[in-house]
Image (spheres, rainbow, N blue to C red):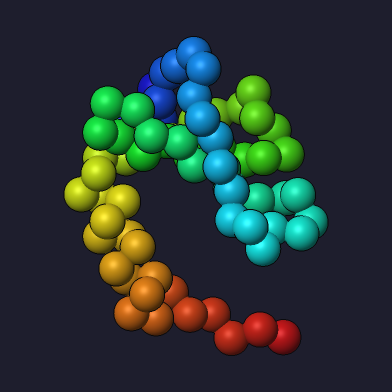
Amino acid sequence: MASNEAERPVQLAWRKASFCASGECVEVAQRDGAVILRDSVQPSGRLLRYTGEQWRSFVRSVKAGEFYVEGP
């Protein structure tokens, strides 16, 4: 198992962005201070687990525009 791949926990409260109109989104849950991600199209697929600090660092980077990709 990859170091950031989470074991499948039971009964997580999954949420996704309110502007996710297509249904093909990343869903996020929290457990024991960790942030867990999954693909909404394949909810029984692989889960990714990040520490709270890893997640906060990612969110700060997104807000700072570090991941901006110009569209077609």
Residue 4 seen by the camera? no
User: In which quadrant of the rendered view does residue 5 lie?
Assistant: top left
- Seen at 30% across and 34% down, the residue is 34
Instruction: In the rendered view, tell whether residue 62 sits above or below residue 43.
Output: below
- Residue farthest to the top? 10
Instruction: In the rendered view, tell whether residue 49 sits above or below residue 53.
Output: above
- Seen at 31% across and 51% down, the residue is 55
Q: Position of residue 71 (x, y in %)?
A: 66, 84
Q: Position of residue 44 (x, y in %)?
A: 64, 23
Q: Nearer the viewer, residue 19 or 51?
A: 19
Image quarter where the N terminus lies is top left
- Seen at 35% across and 63% down, the residue is 59
Q: Position of residue 58 (x, y in %)?
A: 32, 60
- Residue farthest to the right? 22
User: In which quadrant of the rendered view does residue 6 lie?
Assistant: top left
Residue 67 seen by the camera? yes
- Seen at 59% across and 56% down, the residue is 17
Image side of residue 58 versus residue 36, left or right: left
Count of number-bearing discs: 0
Q: Nearer the viewer, residue 17 or 57?
A: 17
Image quarter where the C terminus lies is bottom right
Image side of residue 54 versus residue 45, left or right: left
Q: Nearer the viewer, residue 71 or 21?
A: 21
Q: Position of residue 35 (x, y in %)?
A: 36, 39
